[in-house]
């Protein structure tokens, strides 16, 4: 199933849509700025995340998946089931504030691990809110829905 087109609000329609890196590239790399941003994030996925999170679900979202000409970053999360935490300690280290800040500065990825533990936030759902900046810019409510993409076979590149 293909990633749906941007809606009349200039956003990916609400929901979690399956898509591949190739589909993301074909749909959202429509200018040089976005091309550079995307490849900075892909370097993080390919060089750091793949070895630490293989087999986990990867969700990407944010204003990159809209008509915005120059989004600041790409939001991303992987879902980590509670029983798998101890075998993914290198992944958990990416959650530290210094590592988060390094990843954002070096790769422009706003990356988090979503622990699948009762009481923890589901960041894949949180990324589906329009948020205050986009709501303000587009005349929407900040809790309006926008879409995210679950990257299929992302470990394969």
Image: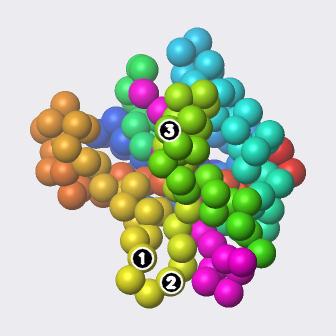
Say how many tags the image has. 3
Dot 3: element: helix
Point 63% across, 80% down: residue:
81
Point 73% across, 69% down: residue:
88
Point 61% across, 83% down: residue:
82
Going from N to C along the chain, the mark reached first, 1 or 3, is 3
Q: Quadrant of the C terminus?
A: top right
* Mark 1, residue position: 120
Say which of 140 and 97 sits in front: 97
Q: Position of residue 65 (x, y in %)?
A: 47, 39
Labels 1 & 3 near each other (Cβ < 8 A) = no
Where, by quadrant of the figure, is residue 63 drawn? top left
Q: Quadrant of the N terminus?
A: bottom right
Image height check: is 73 above or below 55?
A: above
Dot 1: element: loop
Question: Would residue 37 be found to the left or right of residue 39 on screen?
Answer: left
Q: Position of residue 111 (x, y in %)?
A: 54, 48
* Mark 3, residue position: 101
Dot 2: element: loop
Q: Position of residue 71 (x, y in %)?
A: 42, 27
Range of magenta residues: 71-86
| Mark closer to the observer (1, 3) | 3
Q: Position of residue 13 (x, y in %)?
A: 40, 52
Labels 2 & 1 near each other (Cβ < 8 A) = yes
Task: Give me the C-alpha separation between circle 2 and circle 1.
Answer: 6 Å
Image height check: is 26 above or below 4?
A: above
* Mark 2, residue position: 117
Task: Give me the C-alpha separation between circle 3 and circle 2.
Answer: 24 Å
Residue at the top extreme? 32
Task: Give me the C-alpha separation between circle 1 and circle 3.
Answer: 21 Å
């Amino acid at each position: 199933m293909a990633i749906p087109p941007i809606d009349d609000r200039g956003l990916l329609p609400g929901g979690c849509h399956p898509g591949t890196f190739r589909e993301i590239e074909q749909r959202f790399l429509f200018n040089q700025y976005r091309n550079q941003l995307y490849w900075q994030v892909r370097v993080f996925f390919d060089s750091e995340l793949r070895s630490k999170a293989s087999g986990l679900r990867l969700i990407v979202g944010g204003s990159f998946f809209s008509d915005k000409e120059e989004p600041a970053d790409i939001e991303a999360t992987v879902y980590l089931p509670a029983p798998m935490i101890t075998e993914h300690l290198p992944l958990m280290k990416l959650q530290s504030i210094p590592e988060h800040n390094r990843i954002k500065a070096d790769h422009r990825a706003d990356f988090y691990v979503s622990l699948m533990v009762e009481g923890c936030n589901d960041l894949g759902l949180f990324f589906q809110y329009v948020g205050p900046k986009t709501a303000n810019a587009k005349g929407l409510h900040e809790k309006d829905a926008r879409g995210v993409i679950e990257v299929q076979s992302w470990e394969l590149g």
